[in-house]
Structure formats: C-alpha cells, structure tokens
Amino acid sequence: MKTERTRRVSWKLIGMVLLLILCMLPGQILVAAEEQSTAQTKIPEYTSFSDLKGKTVSMLTGAPFEELVRSKEPEVGAFTYFNNMSDIILALKSGKTDACLNNNAIAELAANRDDAIVLFPEALQEGVFGFAFAKGDESRKDWQAAYDTISEETKKELWEKWTGSDDAKKVLPKQDWPGTNGTVRVAACDTLEPMSYAGAGGEIKGFDIEMILTMAKKLDVHVEFVGMEFSAILAYVQSGKALFGAGSIIATAERKEAMDFIDYYPASFVLVVRAVKGQVQKEAFWDSVKKSFEKTFIQEERWKMFLQGIGTTLLITVLSILLGTALGFGVFLLCRGGNPLANGLTRLCLWLVQGMPMVVLLMILYYLVFASVAIGGVTVAVVGFSLTFGAAVFGLLKMGVDTVDKGQYEAAYALGHSDRHTFFRIILPQATPRVLPAYQGEITSLIKATAIVGYIAVQDLTKIGDLVRSRTLEAFFPLIAITVIYFVLESLFALLMKQIMIRTDPKKRSREEIMRGVKVHE
Amino acid sequence: MIKIEHLQKKYEGTTPLKDVSVEIHDGDVISVIGPSGTGKSTLLRCINLLEKPTAGRIWVDGEEITGRKKPALAVRRKMGMVFQSFNLFGHMTVIENIMLSPMDLLGQSKQAAYEEGMRLLRMVGLAEKAFAYPDELSGGQKQRVAIARALAMDPDIILFDEPTSALDPTMVGEVQTVIRELAKTGKTMMIVTHEMRFAKAISNRVFFMDEGGIYEDGTPEQVFEHPIKEKTRRFIQRLKVMELEIHSADYDFVGMENKIAGYCEKNRISPKVAGRVQLIFEELVQQILISRLSTPDIRVMIEYSEEKGRVTFTARYNGEPFDAILEGDTLSADILKSAVEEKEYRYLEEEECPNELKLKVKD
C-alpha cells in the first residue's frame, strides 16, 4: 500500500515538472525563433558610446573594466557581473542588460553563433592576454623563456585554428613528451570558448590551453588543467593550488599589482549588444525543441558530460550522506555522556558550520584549510557537505531522542539494562522512525545544495549545465534539463528512503519475523 | 534483605526524604501510604538507585549498593519495578517486552524466554495479547503486562510505584487483583498507593510516610485501626482540619464566620451541617465564652472526616472549669443542644487552655 502511494507521488512530481517545462516553452520558441531570423547584416541596437548613456553594461566577475567603459561614456547607468559568458548572453538577450564586455575572441565567436546579438561597432581598448602567476613566483621566468622561443607563425596558426569555424580541427595535441620535469597544475576557465573551455568530454581545451601545452613541451613538463569559474582562477593560483592560471585573462595594470603575467597574445576589449530584431521566421515548436535537445545532448556527445555530472553529484551526495550520518551519530554518542569538553567543542563546530553560507565554507576549506594539500575538489566537497550533513544528523538525533519519554529509560534501568544497552535497544529504535522523514528532507536539501560545488572546480550536474550553455548559448533547455534531472534524483532518493522507513519500522514486522527461532505452541 | 540507614534525598528547594532508617524482610508485603509530596516514590526510587541518595546507606542482601560510582546493575536485576505510567517499550510487542531482559541480561534462550513470557502472560490473563503493541492495549492491560515484564526477571522484590494511579477507575480492579494474587505467593513487595482499602487488604506491613520520613511503621491493624500518632489518624480517616485562635474580645468575628463558611464549602459539607457549624461557633464562642472570659484564649478545631462524613467541633478555652453547655446562658445552651448530637467535656489541668468541649455536629 505504502509503496503504491509513493509511486503515485513520484509520478505526480514528474507531471509537475513537465507542466513547468510547458510553461517555459513559449519563451523557448521565441528565443529559438529569434535565432533563426536570417539577417545577413545584423544591425546593432546601439551604435555609439553615447547610446549607452543610462544603460547597463555587464562583464564577468573579476573583470575590472568599469573605468575603461566610463572613459568612453561617463554616464553608463549600471554595471552588473556574471559568473560565465552564457549567463551574460542570456541576460543580454532577455533585456536584463544592454551590453556586455569581453575580449575580441569570445565576443566574435558568440556573435557568429547567435543571430540575436552583434558586436558593438566601436572598440574599447587594445590589450594583451596573459597567464597569471603568483606574485614573485620564480618559475614564471622559465615559462616566459619557453614562450619566447615560440615563433610568430605558430602563434598565428593556433589563433586561426581556435577562432575558426571548423570545430573538427579543434583538438589538443597529446602530451606525448616524457615529462621528466614533473607535472604542474594550471587553473583554467572552462566557459570561455574559444580561449579556454570544456570540450565534449569535459576536458579543457582552447587557444590558451594549446599555447600552454606548446610551452610545456619545451619545458618537458606535463600539465594538468583544472577547469573552474573565471572568478575562481586568481584565488586558486594565489592559494598555491595551481602554478598559474589561464582563461583569456587580460593583463591590466591593476591585476599586475597582484599577479605576475606572461603576456602572450594581443587582445582587445569589445562590447556585444543586441541586434535590432529582423523579420521573425516562425519555426515549428517541435522542431525548435528537437534542435535544442540535439544541441544540448547529442552534439559532441554531450550526454556523456551530463552523465559524468550526474555521477559526480551522486558521488558527493552519497558519500556525504554516509560520512555525515556516521559523523553526526558518532558525535552524538560522544556528547550523550554529558562530557562538557565534547559538548562545548560540538557546540562551537555546529555554530561555525551552520552559521556559514555553504559556498563560503567550501571555499574556505578549498582555498585555506586544504590549500597546501593535494586533494581534489570532490574530496573537499565531500568533507564540506559531510560536515553540514553531520550537523543536521546530530540535530535530528538530539531532537528524536528527546521525544522518547523519560519513563523508557527508567523502565530499562530498573530492569538492570546498562546505559549503552538502553540507548541502542530501547531509545534509538524509538527515536529513529520519528526523525526519518526529516532525515529524508535533509537528503533532498543536500542534493540541491551540491549545485554550488562548481565554485571549487568540481564538474557536477549544474556545472555541466553551465558548460553546455556556454558552448551552445542555449539558455533554457539545459536549465530545464538539469531541473528535471534533479527532480528525478530527488525522487529516487525519496523512494529509497520510503523503502528504508518501511523496512526499519519495528511495527511492520511479521509475527514470524518476531518469533524467528522459537517454536510457538498455539 | 534490604537495610536502609539514615537515607536522605535532597533536591534544590525541597527535601522529600530527611532521614529514613528501616529494614525490609523477605516476604514483607509493604504498603507505603501518606499525603502526597512526602517522599513515598522517592524512597522506592532510591532503593533501586533510580534516584541517587544524597546521604545514607542501603544494603541489599548484606551488600552495600550506595557509595558506588556505577549503578549496581546486578542489584537492579534482583528488583522489579512497576511504574505509574507503565513504561512499556513502545517499539516492541507485548511478548518482546517480557522476553527482552531475560534474554539480554540473564542469557536465557529465546525459546525459554518465550515459554516463560507466555506463562506470565497467562497468569496476568493477557496471553492472547502477546503480539499486540503497547499502544493497542488499555491502561489496565498495559499495567498487567508491566507486572509480567517485572516478574520475568524473577526478582527478589517488586517495587510498585502507584500502580493504579494513572488508571481509569474501571481498570483499577484488574490490576489490584493481579497484585493481590502475587502477594499470596509470598513475593516480597513494596507498594506505594493511595488506595487505603487495598493497602489494608494485601499488606502485612504499612509505612505511613510524612515529614520526610517513615512516620509510623506497623501492621495494617496497628496503623489503620489504632494509629499511634494524630497525623496518621487524620490521614487514615481522611480528616480535613481547620484551626482558629482567639486571643481578644475584639477579635474579627465576621472574618472567622467567613472562614468557616469557606472551609465547609471547600469540603462539600452540606449547607445544613455548615449552618449548624456556624451556629455553634456563634453561640458558643461569641455568646457564651467571650462574655464570660475577661482575657479570652480560645482555640477552635473543626474536623471533617470524609470517610465518615461527620463534622466535629472542638473548643478549648482558659479559665476555671466551665462546661459551657451545662453552665452557660440557657438560651444559647438550648440552641447548642439542638445542633449537637453528642458532647464531651473534659478539664485538663496541665494544659494552657484546660477546658475542652468536643461536640459532634448533627447530620
């Protein structure tokens, strides 16, 4: 009966998700249709800097170019910041911002792929791309020397290869040199196509990346690339987790105060704005959905990335549930004895862990606590989520055990049971069923909370959604897709928990089960 | 088998047990009675160390159980306890409640524990409920299971802490029957109870507890029929007493009349009887005694026995021997006689107020 009901509930859930998607689809059609408007010559909505008066200009978090924009038009309305290019393009298309600033390589690619946006006709400033090293890092000189031996022809060749339209050519060379000088880690942005982005299998590639490999070959070192948000790169390098950072970082004077750079390619800042809407060709609804689906899942076998993302999300979730439960339980047992030291310490830790935004806790663990230790983002995520989940389990246990009547202890003690025995045989079995529903709620919260691990360079489901969006510039479909996947994952965990609740309910045992091993005379 | 010396239990603000010294012998069936808040339950809970005594020592079978760091689990296994609130383990069936401790603590096999459990359930008349869960049982059934659970450990003594207080009146009987049957088997038992008739019927020893100790200790005949101490008598007869003192002719007559009326109302004394009590006070104290005594010292005690439904009015006063009804103002004396069923006059020379006039008020 119970399982029947659960099944019905989960179907209801899926139905609701489908409804949600249907509600979103009109927007989807519109965007899809706009993309189809074939205007050979796209006309920008704004054509001179004075048009930007009172408008909003957006850029990536960590890009310090407000002064530059203001020097051209002092009365820009506002500046807003985003974590990746696809979010900016989406904001631009949906009218949440009016222009976005980026380097020429990225801007051109974006404008070429999307008919709704176009390059702003006036350039902002010329600059140079750089690889960012920690201030005073001596090894920068070796890499600079290696860079200096690269010929201009090679550089040009690479630039054309990665900014060109032929995606088939965009393959990185294998690191087939011996690597006698070891392996270095490089922090690279994973959403800035074509400079530095995640390919079909989630591997980092792009112009920056191949340039680094060219230098690495000369130095005979192997390179391990760690993909992350643009805004995370500098912190990652400064904390020593990577030797240097890449991701079309333009070496400005302000940045040079904090970091040392290898300048490697001329860059220019440009703005991207909306194109004036041309004639909209209506496209069949299912065709646009099909196209979005193909772009999101089929092209470049992106479904494999989604599978990997789901795997990572599940891995973090399951490990955090197991470790967190063990942690919460263990700490509860230590504190149960009333030891003032254990209780005081626990209170302090709870206060710390529960008072901090999860994303801040993760970054502190990643960039400060485990900065000098070579452990990956997934491990740090598991540690962080185990801590918070453990705190939740501790609270649940405390609450559940408190609901058990004092008389249950007294009866057990009076019969001669030890404190330990009383707890495990009498109290805990009665407390557990009372907190399992809340425990299930904590699991759902945990799955959702893991969506922030992208901040510490982990490619979970949400992050994969970001990566795919940054490649396809499809905003809605990947978002809806990962929403559905999260709902499905949550339903799976809910079903599992329902099963556990039924199995562990002492009152659901059969008479045979209770009397196993006893000959019952009727 | 249990020896208690100078046992004391203090909580912040109150001391329910001040000083208890007593011996409990094998085969004793002891009823512990007394007003609430006099440490009856505390005494019971100290014996099996559910409460840690503040001071004093307890020996069980010659072995001291107080003054240890860890509670003596082995000692507790020899003492069964039945609680007011049953405290059956909610996640287990009735039979599991009974089997758990013999299996886990005495190493009994599951089969043996089951056989013994079923025997005990038959004894308390609940064999058919073996696979029910506690929340499916009535209060009386729960308490009978709890008794069976205590018996399964084959304890040397069973402590009953108000076993019928939480029960519906209709269920008190079934539990009392089980306890009564148990008493006949010669099991040592100690029962905290408010049911006087039950206590009288089953026990061979009664503790009357008051003032933080065992105030009176004797056979049921002694304690119930011929209590040595006044407090015991009052409690046994469930007397409600009010005392008034008058030291001046200008005392607050209206205030006292009012007090008497309040007392009668509180104890649900019928308006007719209450009227007589007020009449006696007015005639005896106000009309006769106050006008006669130059420096009055009068003490009035009004007693109401719930047991007998009767009010007694006792007045003590100073001065020469003087029977107010015989020698007082005739009009007032006649009124008094009409309200009183029986009178008793004594003169106790040693006392401060040597005249004592005891009047049984007419029903």
Image (cartoon, coloured by chain):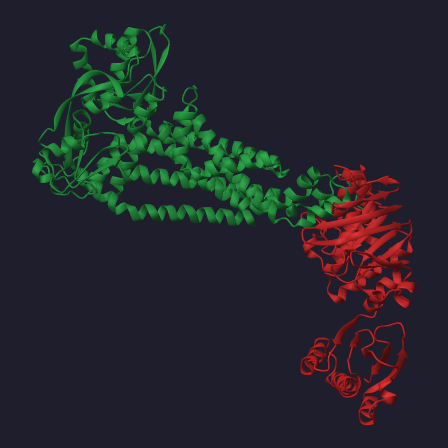
> Where residue A328 sits: x, y (%)?
55, 36
Which residue is more in the foreground, A63 or B204?
A: B204
Residue A427: quadrant of the picture = top right
Furthest residue toward front: B294
Which residue is at a point 83% across and 44% down the rendered structure image? B58
Residue A148: quadrant of the picture = top left
Q: Does residue B192 appear anywhere in the picture?
A: yes
How many discs mark residues in the rendered view?
Answer: 0
Which residue is more in the foreground, A124 or A135?
A: A135
Which residue is more in the foreground, B102 or B338?
A: B338
Which residue is at a point 91% across and 49% down the rendered structure image? B26
Query: As displayed, is residue A202 above or below residue A55?
Result: above
Q: Which chain is green?
A: A
Query: As displayed, is residue B350 above or below residue A456?
Result: below
In the image: residue B303, left or right of residue B220: left
In the image: residue A517, left or right of residue A53: right
> Where residue A32 sits: x, y (%)?
22, 40
Query: As displayed, is residue B162 above or below residue B93?
Result: below
> Where residue A284 sits: x, y (%)?
22, 43
Q: Which chain is red?
A: B
Residue A395: quadrant of the picture = top right
In the image: residue B224, left or right of residue A189: right
Q: Does residue A199 appear anywhere in the picture?
A: no
> Where residue B44 sits: x, y (%)?
79, 51
Which residue is at a point 9% across and 32% down the rendered structure image? A121
Furthest residue toward bottom: B331
